[in-house]
Image (cartoon, helix red, strand yellow):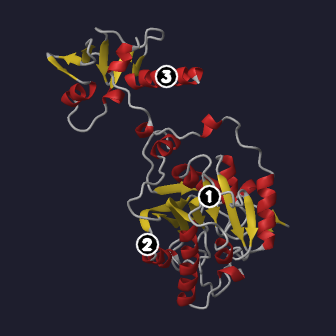
Amino acid sequence: MDSPDLPLDQVLEGDCIDVLQRLPAESVDLIFADPPYNLQLRQELWRPNLTLVDGVDDAWDQFGSFADYDAFTTAWLSACRRVLKRNGTLWVIGSYHNIYRVGARLQDLGFWILNDVVWIKSNPTPNFRGVRFTNAHETLLWAQKERGVPYTFNHHAMRALNDDLQMRSDWELPVCTGRERLRLNGQKAHATQKPESLLYRVLLASTNPGDVVLDPFFGTGTTGAAAQRLNRRWIGIERDPHYAALARRRIAALPPAAGDPAVFANRNPRREARLPFGALLENGLLQPGDLLYFDGHDGLAARVQSDGSLEYNGERGSIHKIARSLHPGPCNGWQLWFYQDAASGERRPIDDLRTRLRELFSHSNEEDQ
C-alpha cells in the first residue's frame, strides 16, 4: 500500500539528495535514474557541413574531478536506497564516461546487479572528427536493493512485447527525435531527453500497475509520461524549474490511461492457481477417449484416460511424463499437447482449455460474492 505521505504524480523541485530525505523510507517500488554523465567535453564539435553539434555543455554535467563525481554518485544512490522498498529495484543509465564508476558505487552500497542492458541506438550521432568509433550505445544497470529478495520481473510481458521471444539484454531503439523531441524556438529543450520507448520497456519489465516509480533526475518527464501510459504512479525530482515546468505541461497533455484495469495486468502463470490436467475432464472440456496430438502432429497421438493420464504406444503417464518420452529434456505438457477444437476444426494447445477453465472459475467466484 502506498504511503499517504507520498507526493504521487507530482514534480518536486529541488536537489534530489535534499528532496529524497523528505520522503518516507522504503516507500517506492522502482527508481529510474538518468544522472549527469560527466562527459568531460573540452572543445566544440562541428559537423562536416560546418554546423555546430548541439552537445551536452550544461553546468549540471560539470564536475571538478572523478573524486567529486564519485562523491556525488554515492550521495544520491544512498538517498535512493533509503526510499526504495526492500523488494524494489533500481535502473541507472550512463555512457562509458560514467557507468563503470556508477556500477562500483552501486556494489559498494550493497545493491546487487541483476543485468546490464545495452541500449543500441539505431540512429546515433556520428563521430564527426573520425578519431574513434561512433558512440552507438548506452548502458543501463538494473540492480535490486537486497540480494535474494523476490523482485518484480514480468518475463511473460517481455516475451509478448518481443513477438513471443525471450527478450535479450541488447535493445535496439532509436534516440529521441521528431515529434517526441521537445523543442523551444527550434532548439532541443533538454540535451539528453530519452526516448519514451526505452522507459516503456523498463517499466513494463520491472513494475506492476499501481506501483510507485521515482525518477531523481526527472528532466522533461519521460519517466512520468511512460508511467502514466502504463497505469503506474510516479514521483519526479528536478532541480531546474524550467525543466520541471516542461515536464508538468508534457504529462498534463497526455490522454488518460485506458479505463479497463485488465489492459495493464501482467500475466504470470507461476502465480496463477494450479489446475491439474484432470480438471479438464471433471469439467467436461475433454472426454475420456479423446485424442491429443503431440506438437499438433498426426503421427504422435495419445489417448486421454478417465483418470487424467495419457496412453501412448502402450505407456501410461501424465501429460508431462508422456511428453518427455517423446521429447527428452525439460518440457511443458500444457504447451506441447494439442486437442481438436470441434467448432473450428483447428488444433490448439490444451493450455487454452486450462485458461478457459480459470475464466469459468473466476466468473463463478464473482457471482458468489
Point out the frontmost of discs 1 and 3: 3
Q: Nearer the viewer, residue 321 or 361?
A: 361
Estimate the x, y position of residue 195 in percent, counting from the top left: 64, 58
Classify mark 2: residues with Cα within 10 Å, few (<14), some (14-19) or many (20+).
some
Q: In the image, is residue 96 above or below residue 354?
A: below
State how far apart marks 1 and 2 are (Cα): 21 Å
Q: Amino acid at mark 2?
A: Gly
Q: In the image, is residue 185 above or below residue 108?
A: above
Name the residue that disc number 1 marks. 213
Q: Secondary structure at mark 3?
A: helix
Q: Residue at x 36, y 14 (%)?
A: 282
Q: Secondary structure at mark 2?
A: loop
Tell me the number on the disc at residue 110.
Answer: 2
Q: Is residue 256 left or right of residue 195?
A: right
Q: Is residue 180 left or right of residue 368?
A: right
Q: In the image, is residue 167 above or below residue 304?
A: below
Estimate the x, y position of residue 170 in percent, counting from the top left: 46, 57
Mark 3 or mark 2: which comes first in sequence? 2
Q: Secondary structure at mark 1?
A: strand
Q: Residue at x 55, y 22 (%)?
A: 363
Q: Amino acid at mark 3?
A: Phe
Name the residue that disc number 3 marks. 361
Q: Nearer the viewer, residue 111 or 132?
A: 111
Estimate the x, y position of residue 337 in percent, counting from the top left: 32, 23
| Residue projecting furthest to the left | 314
Mark 1 or mark 2: which comes first in sequence? 2
State how far apart marks 1 and 3 are (Cα): 34 Å
